[in-house]
Amino acid sequence: MGDYRNLWESLGMDLEKHDVLCQALPPLFDEIYLSQVDRPQGMNYFNFVIAEIHGLRVEELHTARIAGRKVFGTFCVFVPTELITACDGIAVGLCGGSQFWVPDGEKVLPRNLCPLIKASVGAKISGTCPYFQSCDLLVGETTCDGKKKAWEILNEYTPTYVMDLPQMKREKDLSNWRDEVSRFCEQVEALTEQKITSDNLRQAIHLANEKRRVLSRLYGARKADPVPISGKDALLISQIAFYDDPERFITQTDALCEELEKRIDQGTGVFPKSTPRILISGTPQAIPNWKLHHIIENSGAVIVCEETCTGTRYFENMVDEGGETVDEQMRHLADRYMGVNCACFTPNTGRVDDIVRLAKEYHADGVVHYNLPFCHNYSIEYHQVERALKQEGIPVIKVETDYGEEDSEQIRTRIEAFIEILR
Ligand code: BJ8
């Protein structure tokens, strides 16, 4: 990474503490990522993005802000980022995936809380995340209880706007959600001092759909046997999708997909043909949470799909691009987002159906249900997921783990036993 100390200082970061964080990531990335063999050439771009994780993109945000553009930090795939793009703003996904930030989060939050929330809050209050420091507005949402209350704390540091997400999907909930999307639109217009028009919204919807399309293409390649790309690499790309420049991301991912499709034609892969195939389902995996993927892919299986918000829930379902007026476009936008099946909804049978469908589509031999500790929504929903998969004869195991390494060996033992069953 280049020298960005002046930039970080101007963002009010704790440089000493940040140095410790910067030293921890490269060896972790070397061990988990660069040690893989036969990686596609196209991964070089994503390696570069990680090498520059707190550098180049942060500098781009800084330059954009000097030019008057606004940066919005988001934490959930329900935030319609198209509205931000339409008003020439920049959306950046901020969920924290590092154990490094958890102790700082625990200074203001209870310990018995989801690590994703503790890490996200810790990243802000420790002053060690340049993305948090670059945000003009944080956008929270009423999903789980932990997040709902965390916004009140984050608001003490950076203005935080909260979208009221319904907890059910009845007609009246959809109608409330459409209103909520309009309310958010007004907020974005006010902050950016721009007006949404059918033209700028059409372009923004198209750009977001292109990102969905290219992620869908990437995931499509993972249906092949042998698999042309590891689950770890695919996860990395999904994680980067949340903060990279969208146009550049689309170009680079398309180029990678071309390479993957050639590999499929030639019958080459990163794991031998007939390696046991795993579908991950459950809570999101924010950078640098690569723990479960690393354990599974070092235990003789390959991950072929993630039914998570750093997976299919992020890119499945396009926004209908047919709207002519802003009202029609807003309606299509709101409707697409209501199609996301998060466990914060009740009932949420759509997610159970999705998991069964994806397991079949990706020819998964088994499902690993991944749960961050204290995420009750996903933990409780496991009951229905397990029952549906058993009915289909698809083996499933539940793994609940945080960002620490203490339980890695124990998880490895369980995963190895599970893979033995799949063989
Ligand atoms: S749409 S999964 S991104 S809310 S923070 S719910 S893990 S206890 S992140 Fe999420 Fe939106 Fe739903 Fe997706 Fe559980 Fe932790 Fe809450 Fe979490």
Image (cartoon, rainbow, N blue to C red):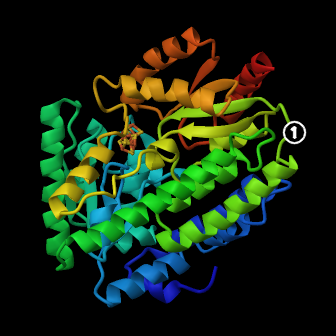
Q: Amino acid at mark 1?
A: Pro
Q: Is residue 106 above or below residue 395?
A: below
In percent of width and height, residue 208 lies at 41, 61
In this rendering, would 268 be left or right of 3? right
- Above or below residue 183? Residue 290 is above
Asked whether the viewer can see residue 136, the reply is: no
Screen quadrant of the N terminus: bottom right
Q: Nearer the viewer, residue 144 or 185?
A: 185
Residue furthest to the top: 391
> Which residue does the image show at 56% across and 58% down from the upper left?
214
What is the number of callouts on the image? 1
Mark 1 lies on a secondary structure that is: loop
Residue on which the image places disc 1:
272
Image quadrant of ligand 1?
A: top left
| Residue 327 in the image, given as x and y percentages of width and height | 15, 58
Quarter of the figure with residue 160: bottom left
Would the CB of label 1 be found within 8 Å of ligand 1? Answer: no
Q: Residue at x 62, y 69 (%)?
A: 252
Residue 317: image quadrant is top left
Relative horizontal placement of residue 304, taking residue 378 as reference (left or right): right
Q: Residue at x 20, y 68 (%)?
A: 188
229 or 132, which is in the foreground?
Answer: 229
Q: Quadrant of the C terminus?
A: top right
* In the depicted structure, whether residue 61 falls above or below residue 160: below
**Percent coordinates x, y for residue 372 in the rendering:** 48, 35
Q: Residues within 10 Å of mark 1 (few under 14, many from 20)?
A: some
Residue at image x 17%, y 80%?
A: 193
Q: Is residue 401 left or right of residue 379?
A: right
Q: Nearer the viewer, residue 30 or 322?
A: 322
